Structure formats: C-alpha cells, structure tokens
Image: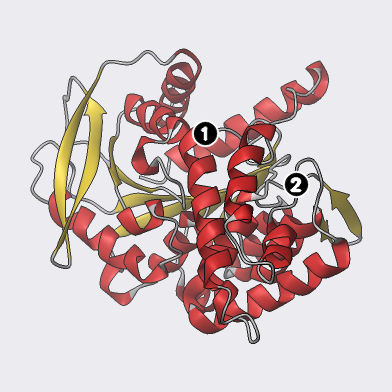
Amino acid sequence: MPPTMLRTFRYTACWLTGRASLVTREVRLDRAGTPVPATLTMPARVERPLPTWIVLHGITRPGRGHPTLVRFTRALASAGFAVVVPEVPEWRELSLATHLTVPTIRACLATLDAVDELAHLPVGLVGFSFGAPQAIAASADPGLRGRIAGVVGFGGFCDLEHTLRFQFTGEHEWGRDRYHLRPDPYGRWIVGANYLTAIPGYESRAAVADALRRLAAIAGDSGIISWDATFEEPRRDLRRALSAEDRPVFDLFAPASPAEPDRAEGEAMALALADAGRRVEPALEATRSFGDVGGPVHILHGRQDHLIPFSEAFRLRDALPAEAVAGATVTSLFGHSAQDPFPGLIDGARETVSFFRALAGVLGVV
C-alpha cells in the first residue's frame, strides 16, 4: 500500500475510534520574547525521523484544548507525524490579532529544530477557522520561505463583508446559487467585540462591545452552539446592565432567542463592521498576501457550517495563484458548530470517498 494511503487509513481509524499509541509533551515556546505553551504529540514508537505539522487554532476559548482540535491532532499524529499545537493566548481571549501568526509559527519552528526525533525538513501548516487564512498568508512570509511545505485550511473565511452578511442574515451565495442557513451568532459577537467602536458614530459603544465579548466568552466556555436557549439568562443580564441608548445596538447583535437580527439593519451593520475591520486590521482579509503563496494549499470546509459559509472556501481558492491550489473540498461530514444529520447512504458514500481523497492529498504534503 502506498505510504500516503497507509497514513490516511491510520488517520481515519484514530479519528473514528480515538485509539492510538501516542505520547504528548507540553513545551514552552518563545514568541518574540513572550513565553507561550504548546502541545507536541507524536507516535509512542519512533523508528525514523518524523515529518512535522504545525496546527493553529482559531478564535476559541478552549484554544489548543478544543475537543475537535485535540481529536484532529491525535489522528494526525497516529498517521506517523509529529504535531505541535501552539497556544495563542490573545486568540483565546477573542482578539482578532493577525500580527501574532508569523511570530507563533517562527517560535514553533525554533522549538522543533531542537527535537531529535524529528525530520528537520519543511513542515506542514494547518489553520482552523480564523487561523486558516492566516496560515495561508503566513506561508508567503519571506522569513518562512523554505520552511513551509504546504498549507491546509479548515473552515476559513476570505471576504469579511460576505462572511458578516451571512452572520447577520444567514444568507450567502456562490455564482448564481443562493443559500440560507441559520447563522451561529458567535461570529458576529466576536467581530462586534473587536470593531464596533471603530465604526463612525459608534465610538461611545464600548459597553456594548464589552458585553458582546463577555457573551461570546460564556458561549465559548460552554461548548454549546451560541443560539441555544441556555444563553438567554446571561444575555438578559448583560443587556440589563447597559444604558437605554446601548440596548438597541446590543439587541441587533444578540436579540432574544429565538429571534434573529432585523435583515436591513443587519446588512447595514455587516457592511459597517467590515469597513471598520479592514481599517483597523488590514491583514484580517489575508488575501492581499496570497499572491506570493507558493503552495500547495488544501482548503476544506463544512457544507452546513453555521459560523462561516462554505462559499468562503471557494473565494479562498479563487484568491490564490492557480499553481498554488491543491484542492478545495466542501463536505457535509464536518462543520464549525451545529451539524446536520449524516447524509443518506448514497450521498454519504459519495461524500466519504471525496473527503477520503482530499485527506490523502493533505497527508501527502510532508
């Protein structure tokens, strides 16, 4: 059996069963003078120097401890890799800090260079959610050239305005096709927390931004999808503490469950937030760096993703140089948050074959 297919079967077996003989080490990284923790996972028995992956988490309270990320890391290590997952504390605190991506990757590389069991060759780089476009852009950084073998992005966004419009209205499109899916409000809470006060006329809404950050933190700590009725009580408590002038703004982002934001007001806010985000954090839309990406780049996205719509996967693909794109796969087999039931037998089999092929391509990067 070809090595890549053997790795794919091992990955799949561990993903499905959770069983693998692995060792995990806690390591300390020096991120440009700031110590940050990381987790290094590898097979318990090492017979040859191991190829390596660096995995970046997204804007998530659990950080490198997110259950899905841990499951992915273990499955990847079981396929015969060393996998390092650095903590980005600022991302855990829900700050959309793009400037930390490259220093974090450099810190990982410096630590990996000192591990004897590893093959000191270019590494694979994985980014989840917010980390996906950041990982792709980072691979083009002049200081990392020659160190990154390829990039994999799971569930990333490309265009801030399209993504925010979906997060307020549930609507997105690709080509002539239009789609609607109930949006996970967590995304708009995060962006509002970061950029609401950068919108002209909203400079005084710091209390609303803080309330949105606190609500997102509560949801992120719970691991439950953010539209769940569980969060109605903390939402009411946060709203009650706001001034009468602030409450309508808060209600646009976080209406009482199960209501959704007013469509017209939501679209206007999405546009204003996108403009503010681009102005405050120009690297938020990472595509301006994509012209120098050498690839290969594999993009994967959940078809029923309630946080970032799958159409963003195709926008990421089309923003890359043609020679850098290794594949863009949209599947119903995973998503950010709530997930539709597994597809029917025929569709499920087709999806499984497609995803298996994509996974084989990913695991062949290093």
**Which residue bears the numbered disc 2?**
256
Mark 1 or mark 2, which has the lower sequence index? 1
Q: Nearer the viewer, residue 189 or 63?
A: 189
**Which residue bears the numbered disc 1?**
223
260 left or right, relative to 352? right
Quadrant assignment, res 138: bottom left
Q: Is residue 184 visible?
A: yes
Q: Quadrant of the N terminus?
A: top left
Task: Give the answer, above or below, for where 245 lies relative to 279.
Answer: above
Q: CA distance from mark 1 to mark 2?
A: 20 Å
Q: Nearer the viewer, residue 188 or 34?
A: 188
Q: Nearer the viewer, residue 332 or 267?
A: 267
Q: Residue at x 32, y 54 (%)?
A: 88
| Crowd around label 2: few <14 · some 14–19 · many ≥20 (10 Å) | some
Q: Position of residue 343 (x, y in %)?
A: 78, 24
329 left or right, relative to 25? right
Q: For numbered disc 2, what is the local secondary structure?
A: loop
Task: Give the answer, above or below, for where 149 lies relative to 231.
Answer: below
- Three-letter amino acid code of the residue under disc 1: Gly
Q: Position of residue 287 (x, y in %)?
A: 55, 73
149 left or right, relative to 201? left
